[in-house]
Amino acid sequence: MFILFPIGRKTTLSKFPYFTVGLIILNVLVFILTWPGEKRFLNERVSFEQFSFQGQQLVDILISEHSGITQTTRILLQNEKKSPDFPTPIVEEIFLSVQNEAIVISYQTQYQWKLHYPQYKALKKTLEESSENRHSLFSKYGFSKQGPIFPNIFTYQFLHAGILHIFFNMFFLWLVGCNIEERWGPIIFLSLYFLGGVVAVLVQGALYPQYQEPSIGASGAVAAIMGAFLIRYAFIKIRIFYFLLLSIYPRFGVFEMPAWIAVSLWFFQQLFMGLMTLKYTPKVGYWAHIAGFIFGVGGGILIRTFRIGKRWEDVFEQTPDRLELKVEKGISASFLNDFQKARRIFDEIIAICPEHIKAREGLLRVYERENNQLSFCQTAIELMKRAEDKEDIVLINEILDRTKIVIRKAELSDFLFFQIASFYEKAQRWKEAVQTYQHILEKFNKSVYLPKVLFAVGKILKERLHRSQEAKQYFEKLTYSPYDLEWGTIAREYIKD
């Protein structure tokens, strides 16, 4: 014996699947309200088929060769036995005449008659007493050719005949429905679910026109979601429980397989069973499962091709869990030296969420490994701005330490050097700030940032490093043209002090 059963999926949800859970709760509530009464009805009901069968036995007794009835009565009973409305009023009248001895039968036949007629009479009485309750909730709200199409084509999907029936349907709905709802939104999810159930029952009814019992269950609708899941999550890992019994020592455990294998195995099992039962009417709606699944596959292909669920896809991509997963993929690509892929992933994250620190850190790591000095410094500055907004001085210092190594040999603009020096100053790394500012003075003698640099260096030397004489020469430069008009007054104040 070998059993495989899916027990979970290797993925996390970014938000609570309200509509999937809502469907499960609604199905369970309907089951609680309908199944106990339906079960009692099935146990207590005397079916018309039983009553008809007992009547046919009585007719067989009467038309036997040695029953003693007239040939006319025998022919009449033989003809009435073929009637679809058997037992007919004529048959009932003959039975009553035999019971009242108005029609005489042989002693041997009387023995058999007295043995079977009381059972027939009891069945008839019970059937008459329960005639007003003969139509169950399943008959009223299940889908059949005899009943109304609407709303039964939807209500039948909420009826289940037994604990295992509803358990497996709701378990598989939870297994695949949560992700479809999250990825494509509740409107598409519910449309696939209910329309899949409609298609499923119509196909099942077309293939088995002789089937008279009402169809019930959500399996066709769930199969549609499974088909959509196959299209959207073909390579997601499904956890499978296995049980193997080849000897007295059973083996069991859990392993993982891609969704496309797990779902395909289920589909081909349904297809095999459907083909095997084409010549008779099975109790399980295999072709409903197949039809629902194919509908879900087709719907999933259309949704992905025409991007019908784009709005929900975009929302999904912006969820924290999804962004975190993308960061992990970007880091993995970076470690594998696939820098182009890593940059693309991190850029996508930053475009969605400019404040995403980990994505910027990942991009910084890529540029560092690529030895792209300019992009590294630009990214470092943007990252430090975000860290400053979050008052994360530890992160600023870490980035400055890494930047310090890069800028020694980098060909950067005066703006980038000025930004880096400003962050040294904000991090109270005074000596490094002065060195970076002095680098700007040495290398960019026509920079528009020169007066700001002169003032910043002078102020740090005077107030932080207590090197007043050295600071004085920087302030004095601000008292001469072309800086004196804007900076002269404040510079002279620092010189006096």
Image: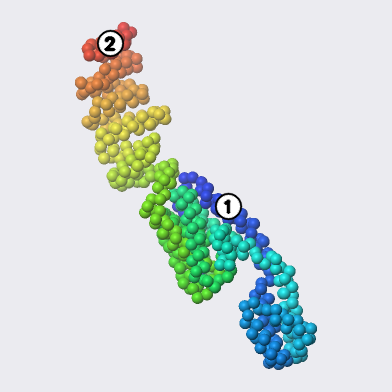
Front-most of residues 492 and 212: 212
User: Residue, x 70% and y 86% (percent of image)?
Assistant: 61
Q: Which residue is mark 1?
A: 25
Front-most of residues 463 and 339: 339
Residue 157 visible in the displayed image: no
Q: From the top left corner, tell me how far across and down residue 364 is, in percent.
A: 32, 37
Height in image: 117 above or below 237? below
Mark on residue 488? 2
User: Residue, x 51% and y 60% (percent of image)?
Assistant: 197
Q: From the top left corner, tell me how far across and down residue 327 is, in percent.
A: 38, 43
Residues at marks 1 and 2, CA–CA distance in whole angstroms? 77 Å
Height in image: 446 above or below 22? above
Q: From the top left corner, tell me how far across and down residue 492 is, in percent.
A: 29, 9
Residue 109 visible in the displayed image: yes
Q: From the top left corner, tell me how far across and down residue 430 is, in percent.
A: 33, 21
Secondary structure found at label 1:
helix
Decide if residue 218 is on the left or right side of residue 82.
left
- Find residue 399 and report its image quarter: top left
Mark 1 vs 2, N-terminal side: 1
Height in image: 43 above or below 59? above
Q: Quadrant of the C terminus?
A: top left
Secondary structure found at label 2:
helix
User: Residue, x 42% and y 59% (percent of image)?
Assistant: 297
Front-most of residues 16 and 37: 37
Q: Which residue is outermost to the top? A: 496
Height in image: 47 above or below 334? below
What residue type is disc 2 on? Gly
What residue type is disc 1 on? Ile
Mark on residue 97? none
